Structures are given as C-alpha cells and as structure tokens.
Amino acid sequence: MDVINSLCALAQETRLDMFRLLVRSGPAGLPAGGIAERLGLAGPTASFHLKELRQAGLVTQHRQGRSLIYVAAYQAMSGLLGYLTEHCCRGPDTGTAIGEQGHEALARVDCC
C-alpha cells in the first residue's frame, strides 16, 4: 500500500466524500453516475476524482452492463488505518503503542 498516495487522495474534500459514500454503500458499490448524482457533481468531475481514488488503490471498479460500478477497497482502507494506528498513535517517549488509557485521550483529540 502506498500510504502517501492514499492520504493525498483522501485529503481532497470531494474524494473524501466519494470514499465515505462508497464505504457506506457496501460491497455492492455504486455506478459512477449514481455517485455523481448523489454528490451533485458533473460527470467529468466525478470521473476525474474516481480515477484518483482508483489509482490510490482505495476503490475498485468493474463493468456491469454499460455502467462502471465503483466499490470501496476495504482491505486497502484497513491497511491504511492499521498503518496510521501503528505509526501515528505511539507514545512520544517510549515508541510503544499508547494502550488503554491513551485511547481515552485519543478520543478527545483528532488523531488517527
């Protein structure tokens, strides 16, 4: 997994909205036109952002008749979350995972 490309793709608001929508839609995914419609995007704009998400490995696509169906790549999402948890949620001095008490603190902070 290329963490930097994944984070860069999700750093853009429209792509983050698309990814959230696809995660919520489940393994059935959504057609490109349906994504554009739900998010109020022009077709070419939606296609551009979906291409970026696909290149980052965060979504997959398959053809169903004349439609391209996009699905969140749950394994990539889990890998990204695992990476962030392992590399971002460490204690400052020990280099070890924060642990139970630390997770309560993290709930109050916008981390991971």
Image (cartoon, grey):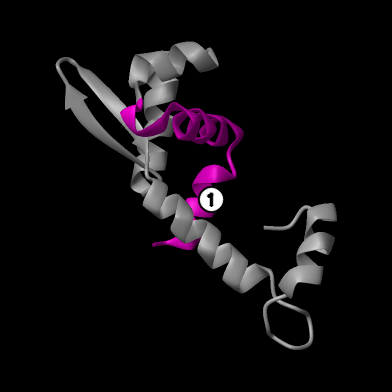
Q: Looking at numbered disc 1 in the image, what kind of residue is underneath it? A: Cys
| Label 1 secondary element | helix
- Residue lying at the far left of the rendered structure: 65
Q: Quadrant of the C terminus?
A: bottom right
Name which residue lies at 59% across and 64% down.
84
Q: Which residues are magenta?
A: 1-29
Instruction: Locate residue 73: give its quadrant.
Output: top left
Q: Quadrant of the N terminus?
A: bottom left
Where residue 47 sits in the image (x, y, percent)? 37, 26
Where residue 3 sits in the image (x, y, percent)? 48, 61
- Of residue 102 and residue 48, the one placed in the foreground of this image is 102
Whether residue 64 is in magenta: the answer is no
Where residue 94 sits in the image (x, y, percent)? 74, 88
For the stretch drawn in magenta, what is the main secondary structure?
Answer: helix
Q: Which residue is mark 1?
A: 8
Whether residue 25 is in magenta: the answer is yes
- Residue lying at the far bottom of the rendered structure: 94
